[in-house]
């Protein structure tokens, strides 16, 4: 289960500030339930949970099992909402270093670095541990099929795959794309690649619980049924009792109305760095419109306390902070003794690292609160597929409710077109 503690923010709001924001959050939730808000044609991320497609989960699982048995490397080619969710879940739920269980998962298509592609191809061409040619599968994920970073990387890699695996290349390429139209559907038709659909009414940043996120996650060996069905159960629970979510959305909205313009999303668990980046995109592309919204910054603590800690403690008081913590960790590493006590840290002898990390969190929380930074704490009981599934849906819904409080459409991203137009002009499109 995840627990949300907004008490610090509530203490900083008057009763009437909070009540006003709460009523707005209630209205916003109703708009989502009734489908009467701006962009309500994009509520497919709720429909997939209201009416789960078991056949699709089965199909994803069986392909993932085959790929896990056959592949040395599984490449995921996508960007933005077609990339961050899969990476977030995989990094949260797999080991930092273990490359033994299942294929190595490599992400590409999320930038325009030629150096990266060159080195990737060189790496793929090196033999595997058994001295054989690496077996590679490629999952290109793009709803439009024309996103520059993804499409160009896919061009390079598809060409390489055709040369490298002339016998069975079509079985090794999997396209995740929109049901109809788009550039990838033409290639699927022409070559018989496997295809998974991104429902038309699900936007990129709300698509982690569709094949966009679920196929790579299943290939990583994570139980997608648990992940998905925990999101389903979060959906059902929140339909009946959304109070914790409404309180959170109301608190964020009330702070926004008081001039808070930045939300620093942080965690003391480095496995959560990409979950925070997923959240950054979900919030950023959804709320930053019409001059409104809080800039969602991401900071990995305690690492970044050594870079931006000063700013958070003492800089302009225009920020809130969202701590994402895990209650129970599995490691039991303890601090060893040292003959000379050369670093003066013998007082920590025998203490577990997770205990020390928790004290670092508690100390930071206390200091930042004293420094007048309003904070919310989001606590996952454990880092597993169950709690991550719940987390994903909770934040999708919270984001939509909060955006309706701001009176912006959570589901479009008109501003992203600005840089694209300039870039395409320069590239001579
Ligand atoms: O959230 C979004 O809609 C975007 O981040 C898209 O996911 C991203 O631009 C990739 O788009 P596409 O899947 O069409 O390649």
Image (cartoon, rainbow, N blue to C red):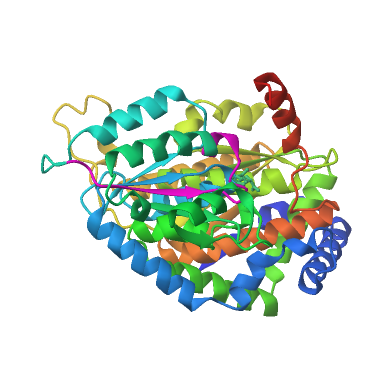
Between 181 and 352, the residue placed more toward the observer is 181
Q: Tell me if 413 is positioned left or right of 2 in this view.
A: right
Q: Residue at x 73, y 33 (%)?
A: 317
Examine the rendered structure and indicate whether residue 251 appears above or below residue 73: below
Mark count? 0
Residue at the limit of the structure toward the left, as seen here: 130
Q: Residue at x 35, y 58 (%)?
A: 219
Image quarter of the C terminus: top right
Quadrant for residue 296, please give it: top right
- Residue 345: tell me if it is visible: no
Q: Residue at x 51, y 33 (%)?
A: 152
Q: Residue at x 43, y 33 (%)?
A: 156
Between 268 and 124, the residue placed more toward the observer is 124
Quadrant for residue 101, please give it: bottom left
Q: Position of residue 72 (x, y in %)?
A: 24, 48
Between 404 and 209, the residue placed more toward the observer is 209
Q: Is residue 48 located in the magenta-colored stretch of the structure? A: no
Please provide the residue range marked out in magenta. 133-150
Quadrant for residue 206, please give it: bottom right
Examine the rendered structure and indicate whether residue 348 appears above or below residue 185: above
Q: Position of residue 264 (x, y in %)?
A: 62, 40
Q: Position of residue 50 (x, y in %)?
A: 62, 77
Examine the rendered structure and indicate whether residue 334 appears above or below residue 225: above
Q: Tell me if 107 is positioned left or right of 208 in this view.
A: left
Q: Position of residue 349 (x, y in %)?
A: 24, 42
Residue at the limit of the structure toward the front, as seen here: 190
- Residue 33: tell me if it is visible: yes
Q: Tell me if 124 is positioned left or right of 154 in this view.
A: left
């Amino acid at each position: 289960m995840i627990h949300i503690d907004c008490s610090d923010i509530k203490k900083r709001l008057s009763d009437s500030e909070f009540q006003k924001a709460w009523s707005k959050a209630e209205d916003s939730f109703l708009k989502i339930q009734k489908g009467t808000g701006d962009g309500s044609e994009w509520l497919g991320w709720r429909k997939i949970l209201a009416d789960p497609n078991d056949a699709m989960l089965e199909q994803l699982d069986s392909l993932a099992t085959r790929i896990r048995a056959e592949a040395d490397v599984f490449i995921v080619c996508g960007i933005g909402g077609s990339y961050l969710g899969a990476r977030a879940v995989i990094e949260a739920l797999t080991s930092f270093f273990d490359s033994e269980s299942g294929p190595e998962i490599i992400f590409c298509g999320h930038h325009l670095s030629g150096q990266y592609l060159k080195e990737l191809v060189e790496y793929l061409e090196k033999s595997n541990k058994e001295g054989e040619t690496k077996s590679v599968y490629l999952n290109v994920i793009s709803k439009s099929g024309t996103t520059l970073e993804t499409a160009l990387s896919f061009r390079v890699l598809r060409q390489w795959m055709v040369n490298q695996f002339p016998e069975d290349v079509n079985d090794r390429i999997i396209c995740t794309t929109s049901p109809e139209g788009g550039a990838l559907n033409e290639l699927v038709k022409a070559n018989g690649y496997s295809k998974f659909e991104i429902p038309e009414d699900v936007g990129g940043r709300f698509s982690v619980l569709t094949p966009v996120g679920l196929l790579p996650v299943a290939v990583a060996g994570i139980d997608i049924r648990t992940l998905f069905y925990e999101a389903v159960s979060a959906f059902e629970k929140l339909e009946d009792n959304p109070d914790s979510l409404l309180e959170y959305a109301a608190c964020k909205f009330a702070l926004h109305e008081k001039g808070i313009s930045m939300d620093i999303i942080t965690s003391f668990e480095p496995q959560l760095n990409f979950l925070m980046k997923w959240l950054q995109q979900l919030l950023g592309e959804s709320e930053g419109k019409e001059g409104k919204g809080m800039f969602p910054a991401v900071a990995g603590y305690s690492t970044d306390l050594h870079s931006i800690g000063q700013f958070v403690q003492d800089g302009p008081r225009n920020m809130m902070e969202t701590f994402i913590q895990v209650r129970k960790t599995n490691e039991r590493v303890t601090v060893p003794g040292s003959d000379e006590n050369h670093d003066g840290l013998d007082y920590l002898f025998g203490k577990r690292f997770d205990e020390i990390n928790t004290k670092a969190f508690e100390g930071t929380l206390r200091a930042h609160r004293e420094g007048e930074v309003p904070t919310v704490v989001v606590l996952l009981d454990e880092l597993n597929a169950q709690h991550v599934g719940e987390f994903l849906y909770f934040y999708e819904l919270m984001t939509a409710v909060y955006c309706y409080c701001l009176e912006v459409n959570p589901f479009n991203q008109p501003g992203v077109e600005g840089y694209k137009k300039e870039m395409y002009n320069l590239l001579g499109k």
